[in-house]
Image: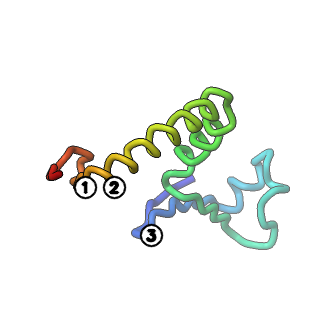
Amino acid sequence: MTACVCKDGIERYYASKTRCSACALKEQCTSNKDARIISRYAHEAAHEKAHQIAKTDAYTDASRRRKKVEMHLAHLKKIMRLKWSDGGQVKKFSL
């Protein structure tokens, strides 16, 4: 099986018909082509890991606490007219 990563960030795996015929997962693929092409987003594993983490109790707790902190920061930004740079550091402070 050969693989290539295309410009659109999709990994495409190519396999010949002879190689596919010996595969145990053949029933899940298209059966009417000479070669099999399986496409997968290049960062699919990272997406799957993020979804697994998001289902944990620790993530739910951290998310709840993060919302409280962000609310306080938004309040400070509005009341004290703080300007934030892209790096998250205070760029300008004026009263």
- In this view, 80 is above or below 37: above
Q: Is residue 1 left or right of residue 85?
A: right
Q: Secondary structure at mark 1?
A: loop
Residue in view at x 72 percent, y 55 percent: 20
- Determine which quarter of the picture holds residue 69: top left
Separation (CA) of disc 3 from disc 2: 40 Å
Please state the horizontal and vertical placement of residue 27, each as a whole percent of the image. 85, 56
> Which residue is at the front of the view, 1 or 92?
92
Residue type at mark 3: give it.
Asp
Separation (CA) of disc 1 from disc 3: 41 Å
Please name the residue that numbered disc 1 is placed on.
Answer: 81
Disc 2 to disc 1: CB gap under 8 Å:
yes
Q: Secondary structure at mark 2?
A: helix
- In this view, 31 is above or below 51: below
Q: Nearer the viewer, mark 3 or mark 2?
A: 2
Disc 3 to disc 2: CB gap under 8 Å:
no
Please state the horizontal and vertical placement of residue 23, each as a whole percent of the image. 75, 48
> Which residue is at the front of the view, 65 or 50?
65
Outermost residue, top side: 58
What label sits on residue 8 in the rendered view? 3
- Determine which quarter of the picture holds residue 36: bottom right
